[in-house]
Image (cartoon, rainbow, N blue to C red):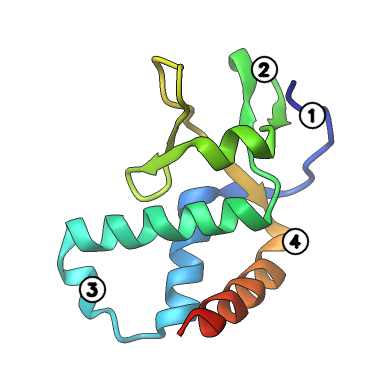
Amino acid sequence: MPGQEEPGEVLSLWVAAVIAYRSLVGDDLEEARDPERLEAHLDYLAAELASILPLFAPIQGGALEILPPEQVARGRFSKGGKLLHLPGMREAIAALSVRNADLLVAIEQLRQRLASRS
């Protein structure tokens, strides 16, 4: 069941993924010249951010609610993190957002996570 926590100031997950991309890659945006590759990178970063941060969406046109992390973990992001496709749901979830105040800490956690994989 979705959470009822008040999110405070939020930004779209897509924007958060772009900020994370720029922070992690820097100004060398060679990947950005290939829209399909860039979208794949942003989808990956959206999934990674969603594994660190609470993900919010308007449920049934209402107020923002936290999506259950176990559902988000089973989902697939598309359109650069603009949509979340969950198993068993016909419609993708749109208007995804994260707390603005949490983003910089999450990017640092992601930077450490990626460094430990290389």
Quadrant of the rendering where the N terminus is positioned: top right
Alpha carbon separation for disc pair 3 and 1: 36 Å
Going by the numbered disc 3, the residue's amino acid type is Glu
In the rendered image, which residue does mark 3 sit on?
Answer: 31
Assign a secondary structure to mark 1: loop
Which is more N-terminal, label 1 or label 2? 1
Nearest to the eye among marks 2 and 1: give it: 1
Nearest to the eye among marks 2 and 3: give it: 3
- Above or below, 40 relative to 95: below
- Above or below, 93 relative to 7: above
In the rendered image, which residue does mark 4 sit on?
Answer: 101
Alpha carbon separation for disc pair 2 and 4: 22 Å
Residue at 46% x, 51% y: name it.
14
Residue at 59% x, 43% y: name it.
97
Assign a secondary structure to mark 4: helix
Going by the numbered disc 1, the residue's amino acid type is Gly
Residue 103, image x, y percentages: 66, 64
Query: Badge 1, how many Cα within 10 Å: few under 14, some, many 20+?
Result: few
Query: Badge 3, how many Cα within 10 Å: few under 14, some, many 20+?
Result: few
Going by the numbered disc 2, the residue's amino acid type is Gly
In the rendered image, which residue does mark 1 sit on?
Answer: 3
In the rendered image, which residue does mark 2 sit on?
Answer: 62
Alpha carbon separation for disc pair 2 and 3: 37 Å
Taking 56 as reference, is 80 left or right? left
